[in-house]
Amino acid sequence: MASSSSALSRLSNLRGHLHPSHSNKGGVGFIKISPEVSEALSNGHAVVALESTIISHGMPYPKNLETARQVEAVVRENGAVPATIAILDGIPCVGLSMEELEKLANLGPRAQKTARRDIAHVVATRGNGATTVSATMFFASMVGIPLFVTGGIGGVHRHGEHTMDISSDLTELGRTPVAVISAGVKSILDIPRTLEYLETQGVCVAAYRTNEFPAFFSETSGCKVPCRVDTPEDCAQLIDANLKLELGTGILIAVPIPKEHAASGRLIESAIKRALEEARDKNIIGNAATPFLLARVNELTGGASLASNIALVKNNALVGAKISVALVQIKE
Ligand code: PSU
Ligand code: MN
């Protein structure tokens, strides 16, 4: 492990990159913010945070790089600045350059999947960490970005009531005031228990233009949500109220996959069933479970699920960028 003094002094040299108004949290001095994101935050412009595990572990190279670039482009086209978040050579970065994005995409699963519990270790060992939803929310909140777009979040795994495999994404939503735009959760997970857990954590779960929580590849899950939002302005009002009340909890806004991109339900379901059986037979547990299941479902569906995945992430980026623009307008 790198000596702690050199790691800390290297990080504190970055303090000059930061604008004090971004956040009042002490740890912000250890984060490198790109000039574009820093300027947007200082000027009160719309910024959308993006995660990086979806790039490293969620999709194969070079589709992952292509998709990451396209998602950033969708955010820009809709009036916001994208801030992809990752840890590079031990430095938490908010907003990646083209070279940095390329480096991460190339590393793929050789980058360390970094949830909240892994952050200190990746920084201390100067590693390259791809941030999951929990770690991305943590850094977004720290620098003052209220909104974050992804594909799907983690949740309560099937049989989670016995294994206790519950993603730290859910507890992060319970403790960090960032709105997460996703297409719900995949049915590799236990969706009803995931929603129960979010309720326990005090997280507001809203669905976009539907009363039902979507299941990533399909628009429906059979589970109703407590809150429906129909426009980006509705979402912005919800986020604004959550921040003004200082509830301290996150919001999950679930946007169903566009109808034309919904993957064949039966094909996906049988692939998920098989991937779950394989994971059980091979005893793949802990943080390896989600990447294994995602990759196997991609393989077993011959790329059909990957195409749906890419389409829904872009759609989430479009909706997320519009929400972040509406949020900035409320504040003006
Ligand atoms: N679900 C997806 N795509 C993903 C992930 C989950 O449909 O890319 C990634 C996200 O980064 C999420 C993480 O935060 O997996 C959850 O991992 P775990 O189940 O180990 O908490
Ligand atoms: Mn887990």
Image (cartoon, grey):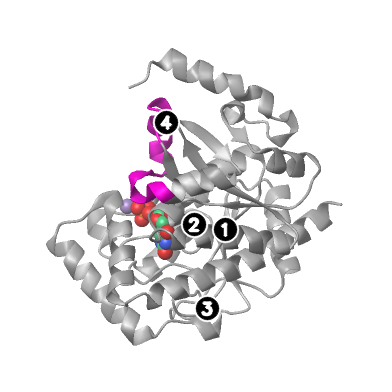
Question: Is residue 57 shown to the viewer in this render?
Answer: yes
Whether residue 190 is situated above or below residue 160 in the rendered picture: below
Image quarter for ligand 1 equals: bottom left
First of labels 4, 2 by sequence position: 2
What kind of residue is marked 1? Answer: Arg
Q: Main secondary structure of the magenta part?
A: helix
Give me the residue at 60% from left, 33% from top. 32
Give me the residue at 23% from left, 68% from top. 276
What kind of residue is marked 2? Answer: Leu
Horizontal side, residue 294 vs residue 94: left or right: left
Give me the residue at 39% from left, 33% from top. 127
Q: Is mark 4 within 8 Å of ligand 1?
A: no
Across and down, in percent, residue 222 comes to 43, 81
Viewer-nearest of discs 4 and 1: 1
The quarter of the picture where the N terminus appears is top left
**Marks 1,2: beta carbons within 8 A:** yes
Which SS class for mark 3?
loop
Q: CA distance from mark 3 to mark 4?
A: 37 Å
First of labels 3, 4 by sequence position: 4
Which SS class for mark 2?
helix
> Which residue is labeled 2 in the image?
65
What range is drawn magenta here? 106-127
Locate residue 185: give its quadrant.
bottom left
Give me the residue at 44% from left, 76% from top. 217
